[in-house]
Structures are given as C-alpha cells and as structure tokens.
Amino acid sequence: MSDGNRPTVMVTGGAGYIGSHAVLALADAGWRVVVVDNLVTGFRWAVDPRASFVEGAIEDAALIGRVIAEHDVGAILHFAGSVVVPESVVDPLKYYRNNTVATRSLLESAVIGGVRHFIFSSTAATYGIPETVPIREDAPKAPINPYGASKLMTEWMLADVAAAHPINYGALRYFNVAGADPAGRSGQSTAGATHLIKVAAEAVTGVRDHVAIFGNDYNTLDGTGVRDYIHVSDLADAHVHALEALIANPGDNLTLNCGYGRGYSVIEVLDAVDRVTNRPIERRLLPRRAGDPDALVADNSAILARLPWRPKRADLDLIVTDALRWQQHLVERDAQA
Ligand code: UFG
C-alpha cells in the first residue's frame, strides 16, 4: 500500500457520470486513483487527469489482477454497470451480466489480489415499492425490476464474501442522483437521458421541446411522483467518507441510504427549473410510466450517524443550477464540434 495507510483506489466506471465525480472527490482529497472503464457509456475526457486510466472490462480477470498488482490497489470503488431501469425490463440478462456476473468476477479478482475494501453503487431500487416512507435500510428488499434485483444480488454476494475473506464493504443505496460538479469539471453526458432533471435541462437548452409529466394521479400531495434528489458531488463525498470509515474499521461493513431525506414532486422540480431560468419550459401530462412508485425518500439517519458526511448542496435550486450549467457546456461544446 502507498502513503502509509492510504491505499491506491481503483475506481471502476470512473469515466461515467457518478464515477467521474467520485474520482474528482478522491483526487481533491489527495487519494491516488486508477480508473478502469470500458468506455461503453463513459468518456475518456471525463476522467480527471490526476487519475491513471486503464481501458478495459471489470470481468477481465487477467487485466484487473495486473492493475491491482501494478498500482498496489487497496480499495475498489465500483461504479461500472448498467443503469437504465426500463432497459433492464426488456433485456434482463444484460443487467445480470453487467451488474451481477461482472461484479462477481471483480470481487474474485479483489479477493485474490488482497484488496481490503470495496464500495458498491447500490440503489433505492432494491426496495421496490416501499411500505413506509422515508425508507430505512432495514426495510424489506423487494425490487420490482431486474435492475434493482441485479444490484440486490450483488449486495448479497458482498455480505457473503466479506464474511469469508479479509475484505469489508460499503453498499451505498443511491436515491435520485442529479446535478453536476460545481466547478464544471464533469456532469451527466450520456445521450438518451431519461432522468427528470437532465431531461428538463435538455428542454431548457432546446435539445428537446418539452418535458413529460408521467402521471398526476399518484398518492402524493400534488399527484406527481416524489423523489429524494441528491447532488452528485455530495454523493461523491459520501464515498470518500465511506472509504475512510472502512479503512478505520476493517471489521465493519456499511449499508447506507444516500439521500437528503426530503422529497420533491415532479411539479416541484419543474417549478425549480423555471425559477432558476426565469423562463417556463413546456410541460405535457402523459400517462404513468410503468414501474414508478409514488414516493421514494431516504431515511438518512444511518449515514449521518455512521459517517462524518454532511450534505453541502442539499438545495433543489442549486442542483438544478449545476445541472443546467453542465448542460449549457455540452451544448456549446457540441456547437463548436
Ligand atoms: N419523470 C417525469 N418525466 C420525465 C422523467 C421522469 O415525470 O421525463 C418522473 C418519474 O415518473 C418519477 C420522477 O420523475 O416520478 C423521477 O424519475 P427519474 O427517471 O428521474 O428517476 P427514477 O426515480 O425513475 O429512477 C432513479 C434512477 C434509478 C434508481 C431510482 C431510485 O434512474 O436507477 O432513481 O430512486 F433506482
């Protein structure tokens, strides 16, 4: 291990949306980072130049073994995977391959290579339709799509592997991740956006001409779906704190919701977008989208108790402002190309 008790950190999916922000947070905090990404949905330019970069697949055991040995990797932050819920319904085997089977291989490489700490991108989709909101970590896990199931199966693997081998893990269950690096170094860049704030940002910049509201007959205050939106930079910081906690307490694992514990409806989000730009975007009411729960809001008391993490950007207007700034950057960049 390098730098005393500070291992080199391997970040899989470090060229993707959340992974690239985690690389920024790690590098800003002085960690040595090596990114492994196959660049299927990520971008080479999104990888911070302070990190080493290896193009390749996490299930390529020979490659991962080499990277662990050559970079003296002591911890893995694992973001690589497939993330589109509706796609998981029509192509479940892709999700079990990319999220579950590939992670099994990565975990085996980690155990063989003597990696001591592993942080996994889990999801609120592991809960399915919650019985009570806000949702605690010990709520029933009943995913309603292959995406959530593929992630939950990985959580089970992690628990079994950590019980059998000298490795501990963090399973961070993300709620709705949005926004972009406040310094403008990264943001959500993958085409074919389906996430509400990204879609709204595209409408603001003329990439699309309206935003659909998928149903207004939900059991919520205004009838539209309620979600707990977390700023991607706060989420990235949570990973750095989780890593520090795993290193400090090698006998402990962490399974933590990552959210602010405050929900906003679709209408409240779109109102925030209009407020920030002072120019309303067109809204069109459409039928419900399949598989959308009424409300998903984190009980975040566990992460606040277990980690010194404190949200810095828990403000919907701020999240929207950062998302819009990044979207503007993408549009200007594409116009120059
Ligand atoms: N919505 C719209 N119009 C859109 C897009 C979304 O009305 O154009 C609504 C949805 O119906 C939902 C809310 O906005 O009520 C949020 O939808 P997103 O698609 O932005 O996000 P989801 O809540 O469906 O899913 C996200 C991630 C999943 C993760 C889940 C857990 O995509 O990976 O959060 O909370 F599992």
Image (cartoon, rainbow, N blue to C red):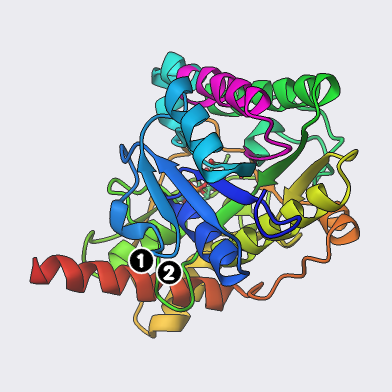
| Circle 1 Cα neighbour tier, 10 Å, few/some/many (<14 / 14–19 / ≥20) | many
Is residue 198 visible to us here?
Answer: yes
Q: Position of residue 292 (x, y in %)?
A: 56, 37
* Amino acid type shown at disc 1: Ala
Q: Nearer the viewer, residue 211 or 311?
A: 311
Q: Position of residue 122 (x, y in %)?
A: 64, 38
Query: Residue at left 36%, top 70%?
Result: 326
Vertical relation: 17 (above or below) 114: below
Indicate the quadrant where residue 233 lies.
Answer: bottom right
Q: Earlier in the sequence, mark 1 or mark 2?
A: 1
* Amino acid type shown at disc 2: Ala
Circle on res. 201: 1
Query: Residue at left 82%, top 28%?
Result: 140
Q: Secondary structure at mark 2?
A: helix
Vertical relation: 120 (above or below) 110: below
Q: Position of residue 44 (x, y in %)?
A: 30, 52
Q: Position of residue 178 (x, y in %)?
A: 51, 60
Q: Secondary structure at mark 1?
A: helix
Q: Nearer the viewer, residue 152 or 213?
A: 152
Circle on res. 323: 2
Indicate the quadrant where residue 114 lies.
Answer: top right
Q: Nearer the viewer, residue 120 or 219?
A: 120
Which range of residues does the magenta coloring cover?
97-122
Q: Is residue 301 left or right of residue 59?
A: right
Residue 315 sits inside the magenta stretch: no
Residue 116 sits inside the magenta stretch: yes
Q: Are marks 1 and 2 in contact (CB under 8 Å)?
A: yes
Query: Residue at left 35%, top 36%?
Result: 38
> Which circle, 1 or 2, is nearer the viewer?
2
